């Protein structure tokens, strides 16, 4: 019940935050500002890293579990995979019914390339493509994996130090053109809830050994 409440609460909080960013005009102003900054050049890299990072993290954890097996090592690998798949499933399910239009770009045609469509939602089922949309799958998956590993890993400080900048780069980077700012923020909230759910579901005895004395 707690897991369900956290997941539903994150979706409701994300909805309210999105409404605030859209109605205040911050979603659109951020988009216009970022399109005129040098940061927009990082968009393709963030997009690609977002696709491969969850796979590489899981493979890396599996390699460590194979080479230097410790109690809970394989379970941590499973948590990474479960968080990534869970984040992807939840974000895709929400995208399929919210129908949020992506930020305008030249693929829309010259007449629509600069039009403010930040408030454009087409609620229903698959009224918009699942590429883009609310929330950002890149951000949701990145923060689901990050939070799950932070909560379950013995050496969680290292996960925070190395994982947080990577998750932020992926999530924020795709808001430089493929996603709205509100979709990035919603991905953080919903992804964190998914990561919490995975940690609660898999956080059994394997993750409790030496946990109180080995958290750095």
Image (spheres, grey):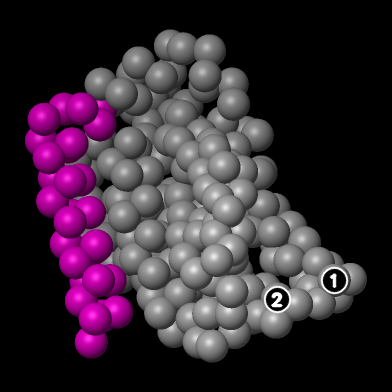
Q: Mark 2 points at which residue?
A: 73
Image position of 122 with respect to 79: above or below: above
Q: Residue 34 carries which label?
A: none
Q: Give the mark count.
A: 2
The residue wearing badge 1 is 68
The answer to whether marks 2 and 1 mark residues whose Cβ atoms lie closer than 8 Å is: yes
For the question of whether residue 92 can be seen, the reply is no
> Does the magenta portion include 67?
no
Left or right: residue 55 compared with residue 66: left
**Does the stretch in magenta take in 15?**
yes
Residue at 66% from the left image edge and 44% from the top image edge: 49
Residue at image position (81%, 77%) is: 69
Q: Give 140 or 167, whichever is nearer the viewer.
A: 167
In which quadrant of the rendered view does residue 114 lie?
A: top left
Find numbered disc 2 in the image and state the secondary structure of the residue it sits on.
helix
Magenta region: which residues? 1-28
Q: In which quarter of the image is residue 109?
A: top left
Q: Is residue 54 left or right of residue 185?
A: right
Question: Percent x, y for residue 195?
Answer: 44, 67
Q: Position of residue 91 (x, y in %)?
A: 40, 63
Left or right relative to 132: residue 211: right
Please give left or right for residue 132 compared with residue 185 in the image: right
Residue 12 horizontal/vertical position (percent): 16, 62
Residue 81 vs 185, above or below: the answer is: below
Marks 2 and 1, the one that precedes in the sequence: 1
- Dot 1 alpha-carbon crowd within 10 angstroms: few under 14, some 14 to 19, many 20 or more: few
């Amino acid at each position: 019940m707690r897991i369900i409440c956290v997941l539903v609460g994150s979706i409701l909080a994300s909805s309210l935050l999105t409404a605030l960013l859209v109605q205040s005009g911050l979603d659109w102003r951020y988009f216009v500002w970022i399109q005129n900054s040098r940061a927009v050049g990082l968009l393709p890299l963030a997009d690609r890293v977002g696709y491969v990072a969850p796979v590489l993290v899981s493979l890396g954890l599996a390699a460590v579990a194979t080479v230097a097996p410790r109690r809970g090592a394989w379970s941590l690998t499973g948590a990474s995979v479960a968080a990534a798949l869970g984040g992807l499933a939840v974000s895709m399910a929400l995208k399929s019914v919210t129908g949020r239009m992506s930020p305008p770009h030249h693929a829309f045609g010259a007449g629509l390339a600069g039009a403010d469509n930040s408030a454009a939602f087409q609620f229903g089922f698959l009224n918009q493509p699942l590429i883009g949309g609310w929330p950002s799958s890149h951000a949701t998956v990145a923060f689901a994996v990050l939070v799950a590993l932070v909560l379950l890993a013995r050496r969680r400080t290292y996960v925070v130090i190395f994982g947080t900048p990577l998750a932020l780069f992926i999530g924020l980077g795709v808001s430089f053109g493929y996603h709205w700012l509100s979709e990035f923020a919603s991905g953080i909230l919903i992804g964190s809830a998914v990561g919490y759910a995975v940690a609660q579901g898999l956080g059994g005895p394997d993750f409790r050994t030496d946990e109180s004395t080995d958290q750095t």
